[in-house]
Amino acid sequence: MFKVALFILKLISYIPFFILYGVSSFFALVLCCIPMVRNVPYRNFYRVYPELSKVKLMIMTYRYFCAFLDYFVEMAKMTSFSEKKMRRHCVFKNVELLEKLSENHQFILCFGGHVVNYEMFTSLPLYTKNVGMCHLYLAAPPSKGLDWMLNERGKYGAINIPSNNPVRSILTLKKEMDEGKSPYKCYLFGSLSDMDPKRDDKHAVPFMDHMLEVKVGAEKLARKMNMAFCYAYIRRPKRGFYEVEFMEMKPKTNPEEDLYAYTDEFVRMFEENIKEKPELWMQWGGFRF
């Protein structure tokens, strides 16, 4: 069954984008017609943008569903991407900042959020030879599906690290760098910290005129390992194409006194990011406000 699913996925990957996006747009319209599905994102948009008319809120909800379904379309297409094509669909800017941060730090924590196809972020190794890319994934029992996912995320050179014990992996990478056995002089860890925290390890921050609970484990780990901090500003000029710009983080409060200074700064920068095109945030479908 798993091989059949992969075969179907492979076939889908050869269908032109414009056809798949047409299908995505159609089913987005269908989802908008189902109250049980539509109500949560519509409610979230209304709470954040109460000044908008019902028509504009519905348009925004429709665009959100388009972006949500586009994620699966692009994931399928990525399975047959060459390196050249991936570089065309996902462009990284200001990579020089990573080189600068690597001069004084062996590790960098890069904050980011769920902006449509965040999976393309793992193609960073195509743009830098000095900074390694580490991807934290939710640890789960071994399975063919997990193996496939990790293989896809690592095919451009990204290193997959289980979330249940990242410190062990970090110490291993540090030892390799200290002994001169690593091909990189620094490693970047991507953290999608806009996820809804399920445990006590959470922190409430002002976001879109509401209080949003976010995870703080990434900042705690980064401070413990003396990591540098940066933010990945993600833009989507058009369907299927992304621009990721690395930005320096300058917290409004003193990081030595405020334990969550960088998490707060991440939320502030992420809010600016989302306001450009609100419908691209994948978390509108959850009860976040």
Image (cartoon, rainbow, N blue to C red):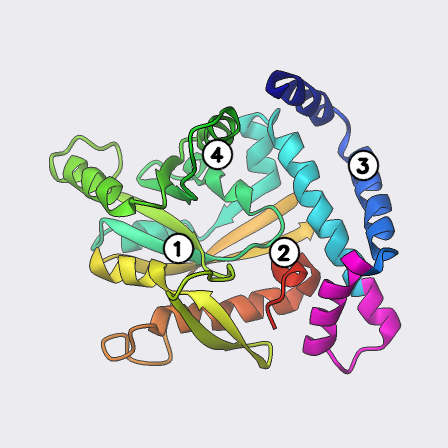
Helix, strand or loop at disc 3?
helix
In the current view of this chain or complex, which residue is farthest to the left?
A: 179
What residue would you read off at disc 1? 110
Q: Which mark is residue 18?
A: 3
Residue 269 position, x and y percent, is 49, 69
- Residue 226 x/y as whole percent: 21, 58
Report how far apart the C-alphas of labels 2 and 3 lie in the structure: 22 Å
Disc 1 element: strand
Q: Earlier in the sequence, mark 4 or mark 1?
A: 1
Tag count in the figure?
4
Badges 2 and 4: C-beta atoms under 8 Å apart?
no
User: Label 1 near label 4: C-beta < 8 Å?
Assistant: no
Drawn side of residue 163 relative to residue 34, left or right: left
117 magenta-colored: no
Circle 2 SS class: helix
Mark 2 vs mark 1, CA separation in Å: 19 Å
Q: Which amino acid does label 2 sit on?
A: Met
Q: How far apart are marks 3 and 1 (CA)?
A: 33 Å
Nearer to us of marks 2 and 1 is 2
Whether residue 41 appears in magenta in the rendering, the answer is yes
Please name the residue that numbered disc 2 is placed on: 282
Tag 1: amino acid: Cys
Place of residue 45 in the rendered image (x, y in percent of width and height, measured from the top left): 72, 70
- Magenta-tinted stretch: 36-59
Image x and y of residue 147, in percent: 46, 27
Residue 266 located left or right of residue 235: left
The residue pinned by badge 4 equals: 153
Is residue 126 found left or right of 79 in the rendered image?
A: left
Q: Residue at x 33, y 62 (%)?
A: 219
Q: Identify the residue at image location x=63%, y=61%.
A: 286
Q: Which amino acid does label 3 sit on?
A: Phe
Q: Do labels 3 and 4 touch, CB within 8 Å? A: no
